[in-house]
Structure formats: C-alpha cells, structure tokens
Image (cartoon, rainbow, N blue to C red):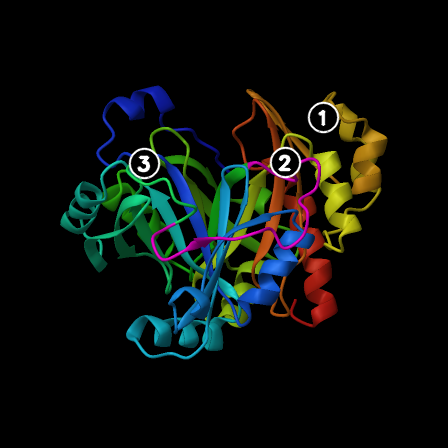
C-alpha cells in the first residue's frame, strides 16, 4: 500500500487554475422530498431554511433545503415531470433509488470555471446562465462527472437569499438541537467501475485542476474476502475533497461491487460530515434512530498502543463504536452510518479532525469487516 501527499495547500493556492470557494450543496434526487426533509431534520439535526414547490411557482418539483453550519443538503422530488430536467430526476430515482445527483461547488466565477472545464475535456450540461430575484443574482453552470452525477458551478457572491432564486425562506420542521450535530461537508466519496478510477482521477486533474492528495492501494485496504482501491483528489486549498473508489479483484463481492450493483452504476457512495464533538453527535443521532456500523470490542483492546491518547477516553470510544486513526499530523475520530435507504448504497461518515488530514487508513480493515458483516446479513457478500 502507498499513501502519498503530492502537494501543499499553499503551493497549490498560488497557481490554482480552477479556484473554488467550497462545497455549495449536496443535491439528492429522492422519491419523497417532504419525508426525506423530515428525516434529516429529526435524525441528523439539520434545519430547513428554504423551499421550492407548487406553493411558490414550481409545478414540476418540490425541493427542501436543509443546513447545518456550512453544510447544505437539497432534497428534490418530482411532482409531475414536464421538462427534460424533471424526467431526468424521475429516471434517476427509478434507476438508482434515493441518491446524490449533484455535488454543487461554489466558485468565484462560474463562467470562467465552466470555460476552463469544457476546454480541458469536461462535458457541459448547462452553459452559464443567470437567475435573479429581489435578493440578487446567481450565475450557474453544470458539467458531468462519473455516472449520472454532475457538478453545478455556483457563483453566489452577489446574492443574499436563503438559497437560490425561486426558493422561499422556510421555517424549521422541528426545533434544531441545542448543539449542532456537524458543521461542514468534509469530503464526498464516489464509487466507479473496475478499471475506471484512474480515468476519473485524471478527469479532476485535467478538468478542474485538482491535485492528487492521497492514494490507497494494496493489501492494507483489503480483508480476507474483499478489496478496493482509492485515490483522493482535492482543490488547491483542500476545501473540496473527492475520494474515488473502484473495486479490486478478491475472493468475494466488495462493498464497491455491492454499491455498483444496487445503485445501477457509478455514483456518490458516502458523504463525510465534519463535527467538533463526535461524542455528542453520535449520542444525538443514535437517540434519533440513526443506525451506525458496529465495531468489535477487540478493536479497542489495543487501541491505545498504536493510536495514542485522544481527547475521548477509550471506554467512551468503545461504548459508541467510534474509530480512531493517527498519522504524522495528528489524529481523527470517525464513525459510519449504515445505508440510510433500503438499497445498500448511500451512507454517511461523521469525522472529527485533530490535525490529521487523512481518511482513516488505519481503520480500513476494521471498517471493511464491519461492512462485510452487514453485506452478509443482506446476502450480498
């Protein structure tokens, strides 16, 4: 296995050909956006802030915008398809189930970003266009990436509305918790078909000027039964990080194989959410009914020997099944939910970083074994 860091944020920032401001939104196409909004409000502690639907002029779709700190989810379902966009969303849910349709990225100049991307090989979905209302103007454009996922490029520097023109401010569905469950989107992981990881890494290198942050290949990212390979691309400031996974040949079906089979192709596997108190986050989410992957007690028996001290006592980590990893820069705490829909596809990670910019390399084996136990219950190993 190799793990490499190819560039520093400061160096990359100085010569970034595709500057970004951060993740703008993770956009989900779902079968019932009203119910999904309730789930993420109650189970994840998010706050409904904006809505678009028949009540304010959108006859085709209903969309609910939820936030937690800088993290934004947009949940959209089709009411009655009448345009290509509506039919696309309808087909997306029929083919993939509830899933991520758009990883929207905020950029300082959507026109320049789109022009650079297309010039360097991106397939354009929507050329730059303006939308406006009494809150100002937003410039949008969109390019295609793996599977049927897209990146909308959002320039919102001249806008102060709740989300986008066409959306009205909305009251929370439930009272948000006293303490935020998470603060931002840390990274978004994509699964692609066997043999296509390097192709999509090159796409981000060439089309968006992203650099290769880390890579994971070899025996340490495998169990007795399954394996995968992963490379991480990121913008120059490390605000937007996209690990790309592909399956590797092994004795049995890997988690990536299972995802590709049930999702119907490449797509977003999980979204990692940054929290500054993973203990409070996990307690709150568990109490609200979120199911997390289990970790055997044996993992914690020798944890202190290789992970060292963390701000959370080992017994609390054991109680809550939180994982730890440490590298030369510090440590991180992480835990993964089970899939949040009936298909074994999209799930979430909660991550608390203390210096480390890694992705839990030391936990891969324990994590994959936990996933395999769930695969076996589903009859998909």
267 sits left or right of 121 in the view: right
Tell me which residue sits at (37%, 49%) in the image: 104
- What's the distance in space between the residues labelled 1 and 2, CA to CA? 10 Å
Question: Pointer 1 and pointer 2: residues touching (CB < 8 Å)?
Answer: yes
Query: Looking at the image, which is closer to me, 41 or 142?
Result: 41
Is the Cβ of the residue at disc 3 closer than 8 Å to that at disc 1?
Answer: no
Residue at 56%, 59% in the rendered image:
346
Q: Position of residue 223 (x, y in %)?
A: 64, 51
80 over 234 or under it: above or below: below
Quadrant in the picture for the C terminus: bottom right
Give the magenta range.
Answer: 164-183
First-in-chain label (3 vs 1): 3
Q: How many marks?
A: 3
The residues bearing labels 2 and 3 have C-alpha atoms spaced at a distance of 30 Å
Q: Earlier in the sequence, mark 2 or mark 3?
A: 3
Which callout, 3 or 1, points to the residue nearer the camera? 3
Q: Is residue 104 visible?
A: yes
Magenta-drawn stretch contains 174: yes
Q: Which residue is label 2 attached to?
A: 362
Q: How far is the residue under mark 3 from the one under mark 1?
A: 37 Å
Q: Which residue is nearer to you in this view: 257 or 105? A: 105
Q: Secondary structure at mark 2?
A: helix
The tag on residue 20 is 3
**Disc number for residue 306:** 1
Within 10 angstroms of label 3, few (less than 14), some, or many (20 or more) residues?
A: many
């Amino acid at each position: 296995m190799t793990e490499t860091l190819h560039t520093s944020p400061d160096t990359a920032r100085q010569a970034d050909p595709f500057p970004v401001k951060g993740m703008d939104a993770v956009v989900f196409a779902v079968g019932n956006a009203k119910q999904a909004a309730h789930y993420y409000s109650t189970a994840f502690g998010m706050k409904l802030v904006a809505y678009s639907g028949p009540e304010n002029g959108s006859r085709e779709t209903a969309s609910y915008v939820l936030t937690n700190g800088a993290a934004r989810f947009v949940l959209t379902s089709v009411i009655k398809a009448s345009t290509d966009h509506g039919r696309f969303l309808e087909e997306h849910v029929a083919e993939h189930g509830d899933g991520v349709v758009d990883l929207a990225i905020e950029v300082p100049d959507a026109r320049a970003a789109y022009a650079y991307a297309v010039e360097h090989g991106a397939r354009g979905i929507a050329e730059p266009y303006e939308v406006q209302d009494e809150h100002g103007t937003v410039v949008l454009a969109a390019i295609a990436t793996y599977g049927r996922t897209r990146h909308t490029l959002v320039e919102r520097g001249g806008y102060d509305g709740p989300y986008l023109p066409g959306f009205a401010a909305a009251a929370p569905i439930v009272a948000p918790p006293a303490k935020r469950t998470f603060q931002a989107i840390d990274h978004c992981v994509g699964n692609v078909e066997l043999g296509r990881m390097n192709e999509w890494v090159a796409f981000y290198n060439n089309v968006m000027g992203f650099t290769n942050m880390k890579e994971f290949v070899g025996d340490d990212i495998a169990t007795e039964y399954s394996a995968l390979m992963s490379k991480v691309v990121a913008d120059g400031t490390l605000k937007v990080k996209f690990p790309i996974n592909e399956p590797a040949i092994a004795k049995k079906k890997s988690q990536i194989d299972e995802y590709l089979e049930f999702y119907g192709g490449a797509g977003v596997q999980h979204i990692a959410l940054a929290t500054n108190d993973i203990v409070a986050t996990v307690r709150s989410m568990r109490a609200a009914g979120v199911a997390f992957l289990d970790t055997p007690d044996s993992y914690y028996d020798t944890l202190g020997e290789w992970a060292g001290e963390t701000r959370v006592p080992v017994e609390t980590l054991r109680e809550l099944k939180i994982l730890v990893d440490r590298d030369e820069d510090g440590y991180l705490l992480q835990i993964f939910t089970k899939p949040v829909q009936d298909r074994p596809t999209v799930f979430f990670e909660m991550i608390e970083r203390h210096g480390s910019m890694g992705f839990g390399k030391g936990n891969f084996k324990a994590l994959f074994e936990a996933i395999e136990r769930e695969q076996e219950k589903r009859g998909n190993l």
